[in-house]
């Protein structure tokens, strides 16, 4: 059985989701789907100029995984440039942030993607072990979830 896909942290969302070769009709041009994590790998390595190890850390993946993502992205971009294909940027296994969280009741620690925490914002976010709602950031953020993308812990919940 294959391992579950690890969420890739991305910091940048593109404002333009399509690149279409000039003087073509978009409906008739084959396209390559460039995943958001592939675009992030290209941005970090080729545009920002970071070393692969730092890129991998920023995306919260291993260096070999980062290398595979980067190679796939470069192959799709090269195919589009050489063969005149459209590039459509969409989808993938990504998150805006990966938060280390801790249950104050049972002490369980785990990482959670930002989108899961936000989903429970209107109700209550709870520990997967003991179902306690006393869940906080494990980065010593004084009772809040980390960074600007994460939910702040509501102390009125107990």
Image: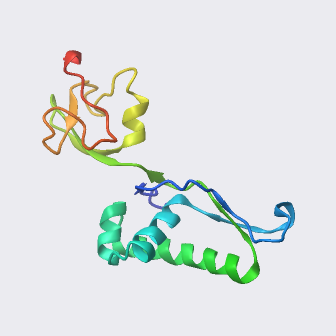
User: From the viewer's perspective, is 123 left or right of 136?
Assistant: right
From the top left corner, tell me how far across and down residue 12 is, in percent: 45, 56
Residue 158: image quadrant is: top left
Residue 156: image quadrant is: top left
Viewer-side residue, 6 vs 99: 99
Which residue is located at x 85 percent, y 60 percent? Answer: 27
- Work out which residue is located at the far bottom of the displayed protein and give it: 82
From the top left corner, tell me how far across and down residue 116 is, in percent: 41, 37
- Work out which residue is located at the far front of the displayed protein and give it: 23
Which residue is located at x 82 percent, y 62 percent? Answer: 26
Residue 74 vertical position relative to residue 149 in the rendered view, above or below: below
From the top left corner, tell me how far across and down residue 117 is, in percent: 36, 35
Residue 55 vertical position relative to residue 112 in the rendered view, above or below: below
User: From the viewer's perspective, is 151 left or right of 142?
Assistant: right
Viewer-side residue, 154 vs 27: 27
Residue 137 vertical position relative to residue 134 in the rendered view, above or below: below
Residue 43 vertical position relative to residue 106 in the rendered view, above or below: below
User: From the viewer's perspective, is 81 left or right of 64?
Assistant: right
């Amino acid at each position: 059985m294959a391992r579950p896909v690890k969420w890739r942290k991305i910091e940048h969302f593109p404002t333009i989701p399509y690149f279409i070769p000039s003087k073509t009709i978009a409906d008739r041009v084959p396209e390559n789907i460039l995943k958001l994590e592939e675009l992030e790998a290209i941005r970090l390595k080729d545009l920002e100029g970071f070393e692969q190890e730092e890129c991998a850390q920023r995306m919260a993946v291993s260096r070999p995984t980062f290398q595979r993502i980067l190679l796939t992205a470069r192959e799709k971009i090269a195919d589009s440039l050489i063969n005149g294909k459209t590039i459509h940027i969409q989808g993938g296994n990504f998150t805006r942030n990966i938060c280390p969280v801790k249950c104050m009741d049972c002490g369980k620690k785990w990482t959670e993607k930002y989108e899961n925490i936000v989903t429970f914002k209107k109700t209550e976010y709870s520990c997967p072990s003991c179902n306690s709602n006393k869940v906080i950031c494990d980065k010593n953020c004084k009772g809040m979830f980390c960074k600007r993308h994460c939910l702040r812990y509501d102390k009125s919940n107990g």
